[in-house]
Amino acid sequence: MKEFVLAGNAGGVREIDFAAELNEEQLRVVEVGDGPTLVLAGAGSGKTRTITYRVAWLLAQGVPPERILLLTFTNKAAREMVSRIETLLGRFPHGLWAGTFHSIANRLLRQHGFREGYAPNFSILDDEDSGDLMKLCIKQSKVDLKGQRFPSANVLKGMVSYARNANRSLKDVLDARHPHFSPFADVVLRIAEAYERQKRDANVMDFDDLLMVLLSLLRNHPDVRATLSEQFAYVFVDEFQDTNIVQADIVHELSSVHGNILAVGDDAQSIYSFRAAEIKNMLSFSERYQNAKMFRLVTNYRSTPQILGVANAVIAHNENQFAKELIAAVPDGEKPLLVPANSASQEAQYVVEQIAQLLDADVQLREIAVLFRAAFHSQQVEFELMKRGIPYEYRGGMKFFERAHVKDALAHLRILQNVKDLVAWMRVLSLQEGIGPATAASAAQNLTQHDDIDTALRASPVRGAKTGRGWELCRGILVAMHSAKNPADALRAFAGSDYEDYLEAEYPNARERLDDLEQLAVFAEQFADAAAFLDAVSLSAESPDSKHQTPDEEKIILSTIHQAKGLEWDTVFIIHLAEGMFPNSRAMDDENGLEEERRLFYVAATRARRRLVLSYPITSGYEHVELRQPSQFIAEIPKNLLEEVRLRYAGFSPPSSYVPPTRKSWYAADETETTIVLDDAGECVTKPMPSAFLRDIDEL
């Protein structure tokens, strides 16, 4: 047993028994982590604990705090680690360098940035500031659009940022990720150059500059690199799998003298390639650092063996990875459930039924999460939760009906339903180029004077060529929607109109927003007329009081998987596990897309501590029903690792007259081993849910 007494403050220092407080895997990292070291820390394996004890070990050996650099990806992670180190030491580790890549870069550039031409008092632009500067550069470029939509400042900023962090040319990024803007390539490059020049002239940096300038400083000035890399005798990097090329190069330069780099992460949780994170930084670690050591932390303190069995089975299919298998340190639990449902609506009703029962069993709201691959997958579950009055918190963006593009679509539909809706008119008019707030308000007042939509659409509420073009585009959208036979077709006409060009030009995630609009149209297929649909949407926001609400505002968590990384809950539902949904169909176009999608599933599954439920709809749509195969990830899980659930909807009607089921319409069937089949009545037959998790559904 090894005990160390930290020197230098005998009265208030805690003795640390490292051997007693760490498992063998963690202790090996703490004791022999000198030199270039890669720690493969599986989900729930005590990654943060290992890092903080390693820092405490070094301090116990007499390493001065100011010679230790701890790099993280969030300020919260940095604060948590420093707090844990303080608890371990019994005193605050004054002098320790701990923070995000950007915050550490800022500190270093305040001291040495003048070598790269920046005065020490340089300003840092936040996202809004940098967007405003990009807008100015676009305006000063005097782009001749000739009626075409040019990418917005935010879209341009996203292109420039990705190119810099991925170490790719802007032209390459434009062609690969935004080919619809390729005709503007010369103009885009000119604006990007102006943006860089304006920042230099103003002695300001955006967040990307902090990293780029620091790397340039380290490479162009050997004396600075030698000073800093001599100072930082030990460099720690948390979540190494999330580093981009620039960050990995900075770490390499800062550790060039002593070579003591401890990179901790999990290649199986590398899910941010869209932000230019580069998994090769981990996979090629031993190639970059000669004589590198590698340790594996595979003892999982979070999930049951049954949940880890599912996660291990799926991730094993990835080829580009460090093979490892998580081992549970907690007792056995229930098998994860596999739940095919007839439709997304039935899937949502099932999920919310189980949530309600868990709440009735005194499970806390904050211990339940519903996870999904894409934001639009949550719409049906949100609607069900709102109808039941179960409070929820949405992570990964706005709640479905609060998203700008959804509200844009609904505003157009409201006008067709009520021509005197002033607020809706102002919103739809303001979307068009050439129509500012004042013009939109005046035109809206004029349009609401008409008694019917046909008369309003023949009006000329604006003057001038530019505003006139805007009105014609607005009118064209409304005419196309007005000719549709039902609200679903009207919404699809809206999504396929000039509004699609608006989204492409205005938002970096335009395709995801179009997916949202399609989901809204699918939801609208339940309604024969726009009035009923709009009523359902509007009234859903005014949920009745719920017996599940608590004084401290506890809420169910609805989250994209990307936003859920690093978190955990007792019960996790992973929904929409169908082909084309998860894995995401667009991700499959990328060379390494499938493996990253598989890592996303692994991250989602390992968020669960006790209960994991996998579900998917076997049909999509209402009027035009399409059959969907279960996700290939489900096929990769041995059948004996899952408990199948059979759902039936009593009195199933043809899709065109589909009515969402009520609680009384659910029932469980007898326990017979069957295959998943969609019969002529639209029933999905599988194995029923175990009684340990779900009460007899007949009691509902």
Image (spheres, rainbow, N blue to C red):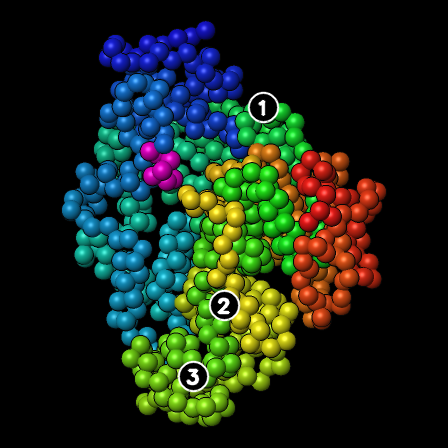
- Is 263 one of the magenta-colored residues? no
Main secondary-structure element of the magenta-colored stretch: helix
| Quadrant housing the N terminus | top left
Which mark is on residue 329? 1
Residue 270 vs residue 680: left or right? Answer: left
Horizontal and vertical percent position of residue 132:
27, 63
User: Cα distance, mark 3 to mark 1?
Assistant: 64 Å
Q: Secondary structure at mark 3?
A: loop
- Magenta range is 73-79
Above or below, comparing residue 664 to residue 412 in the picture? above
Q: Earlier in the sequence, mark 1 or mark 2?
A: 1
User: Cα distance, mark 1 to mark 2?
Assistant: 48 Å
Horizontal and vertical percent position of residue 541:
48, 62
Above or below, comparing residue 140 to residue 6 in the picture? below
Horizontal and vertical percent position of residue 317:
66, 39
Q: Secondary structure at mark 2?
A: helix
Which residue: 76% across, 68% down? 654
Foreground label between 1 and 2: 2
What is the crowding at mark 1: few (fewer than 14 residues within 10 Å), some, or many (at least 20)? some
Horizontal and vertical percent position of residue 314:
65, 39
For the residue pair 116 and 697, the one nearer the viewer reads as 697
What amino acid does circle 1 point to?
Answer: Ala
Which residue: 71% across, 70% down? 657
Q: Which residue is mark 3?
A: 420
Q: Which residue is mark 2?
A: 538
